Image (cartoon, grey):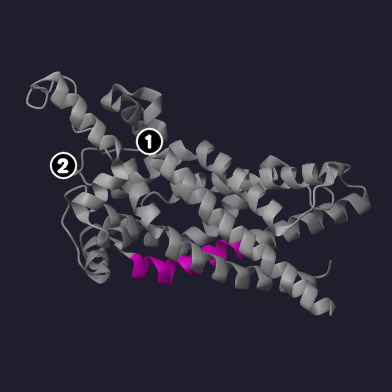
Amino acid sequence: MDDEDNKHIVFDTFMGSIIGCTISKIVLYPLDTIKINKQIYKQPIEKGNNEYKKNLLTYIQNKNKNTIFLYNFIKTYGFKDLYKGFTFSSLTTIPATCLYFCCFEYLKLKKLQYNNVFQEKGIINDKSNKNDDLNFISYFSLAFLSEAISCIIFVPIDVIKERLQAQKYLQLKEHKTTSKLIKEYIYKQGLSRLYRGYISTCLSYGMFCGSFFFFQSIGHKIMNQLDIESSHYNNLKLNLACSFISGFISSPLDIIRIRFQLQEKDKTFFYYKNFMDGLKKLCREDNRRIYNLFKGNFYRCCLLSLSMTINVSVIEMYKKYMISKKSQ
């Protein structure tokens, strides 16, 4: 495969990702809002709080109400707040996501090219890296590097978006316009405030995407061995399963990342010095220990599995469409 073919593949990836990202952003943005608020959620009824524990029945009733998070959020803040920050997020996140997929595709093609060249010259004898096969470390490295590039644009967007989505729930100062929030951040805390959690974002999404593409490659190999047709429907099911598993694996990294980006000293009930400090404090919260690392995991896995499935499936469909169009 020459450089000209690589350019066409990357361009097709770009066009497909624009379509896929636009669809997923419009459909799944409310789920993203719920996911973020669930991950920063803290049980309002705590042990030893006699004010709330007047009797056991009241305590159980309140606790059960709080478990229906989606219902309570809509009831308290309305449907409108499910799309808080949507315009800013859409206009900025879609290009950033497209950049990620293009970077990953380009780096993957280059990696495979180098592997083939080295094998032909006899420098390496690792047959597992031939053709479209890469190991988990390679996928994670490519995903992390792609995230590091795309996060230059993505992290400031994510910091602003999450603040707008969670400001009511955290009872922070409400900003009606994105521009005022950006000005306040830069004026009071400097440009570095917009890049808070850069490394943890790269790790979180790098782990998710690296795991996804690794599991996807294994899934395709299994499908070939079992003579399962590589149809759009079968690929859709494969992408859905791979993204859900990857979302579950990377969940603990994501909760700490979001809280670290949102925290404000003496204003939010959480405040972490670094990742390890966040890990310790999160496990101690509400005495729920390891369970807290997967707080909001259902919403997150649903969001990531659906968005990644839509994005990757649309990209694959667009590539196949362009290949069939050229062959005619």
Quote the CA–CA distance across marks 1 and 2.
23 Å
Q: Nearer the viewer, residue 125 or 133?
A: 133
Q: Quadrant of the C terminus?
A: bottom right
123 left or right, relative to 181: right
The quarter of the displayed image where residue 222 is located: top right
Identified at 35% across, 34% down, the residue is: 278
Q: Nearer the viewer, residue 296 or 280?
A: 296
Identified at 27% across, 59% down, the residue is: 79
Say if 286 sits above or below 190 in the image. above
Q: Quadrant of the N terminus?
A: bottom right
Say if 269 sits above or below 166 in the image. above
Q: Residues within 10 Å of mark 2 (few under 14, many from 20)?
A: few
204 left or right, relative to 288: right
- Three-letter amino acid code of the residue under disc 2: Asp
Q: Which residue is mark 1?
A: 295
Query: Percent position (x, y) of residue 41?
Result: 28, 39
Query: Percent position (x, y) of residue 280?
Result: 35, 27
The kind of secondary structure element at disc 1 is loop
Magenta part mainly helix, strand or loop? helix
Query: Percent position (x, y) of residue 190?
Result: 28, 60
148 left or right, relative to 124: left
Is residue 100 highlighted in magenta? yes
Q: Residues within 10 Å of mark 1 (few under 14, many from 20)?
A: many
Q: Which portion, as a residue range, is magenta?
A: 86-103
Res 168 seen here: no
Identified at 92% across, 52% down, the residue is: 121
Q: Nearer the viewer, mark 1 or mark 2?
A: 1
- Three-letter amino acid code of the residue under disc 1: Lys
Q: Earlier in the sequence, mark 1 or mark 2?
A: 2
Using the image, tell me which numbered label, if any, was put on residue 266: 2
Res 219 seen here: yes
